[in-house]
Amino acid sequence: MITRDRHYRAFDFEIREAKEGDDRLMVYGKPVVFNEETVIWEYDGIQYKEVIDPRAFDKCAMSDVILNIDHSGKPGAKTTNNTLRLFIKVDGLYMEADLSKNMTGRELYEDIMNGFYDKMSFSFRVADDGSEYDKATRTRRITNIKRLYDVSVVSFAAYEQTSVVARSWAEARHEIGAEVPNGGSEDLGETEVSKVELERLRFKVLDKISEVY
């Protein structure tokens, strides 16, 4: 289920033909690419970007992560029973999943093979002190991910809910810049940004409200 306190990002994945005698149903992917800019919000030609630092997963809790569909429902694979495995390499976070162990996984594998799904998303929570902001480039660098919740096959590559938290953060940065004369907002830290954002979000309808890390 999509929740308001998590970040969601999309990525590609792949199917590889099983080796002879191997009855596993394997899918592989690269959920996270390090040091690659992602535009999370744009207004009047001004882009706010995000980058995942190579050390962002150094303290991340990844012992109980699931693979499911649209971030909801029964898992098709899970780290706790070794049907889902995660690997941190120099250029990103990789995953492989064996979908042969339950009905959900087997049905999901068939849907993937038949072209119903060709994208994935992952959800995570950033630590309270887990990001840095470059005011010159308007880029947020995620340096400390507290928890990885799931890697999920999704119906659409980038549906509206996937980036609501990140967009809220970027909108707050933009609004502060517009409200403080002569760019004085650039000296504000993450705490001040969060306060302004939360005050603004208080007046939005509930289905558009997001918590800020």
Image (cartoon, rainbow, N blue to C red):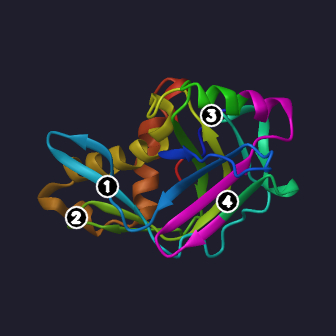
Residue 152: mark: none
Q: x%, y% of residue 45? A: 14, 43
Residue 2: mark: 3
Residue type, mark 2 in image: Thr
Q: Residues within 10 Å of mark 4 (few under 14, many from 20)?
A: many
Residue type, mark 4 in image: Arg
Rounded to the nearest whole Å, what is the CA distance between mark 1 and mark 4? 21 Å
Residue drawn where x is 55% and y is 73% of the image: 89
Check disc 2 and report the residue beneath it.
Answer: 137
Check disc 4 and report the residue beneath it.
Answer: 147
Rounded to the nearest whole Å, what is the CA distance between mark 3 and mark 4? 15 Å
Q: Quadrant of the N terminus?
A: top right
Rounded to the nearest whole Å, what is the CA distance between mark 1 and mark 3? 22 Å
Q: Nearer the viewer, residue 60 or 121?
A: 121
Residue 49: mark: 1
Residues in magenta, as a range: 87-107
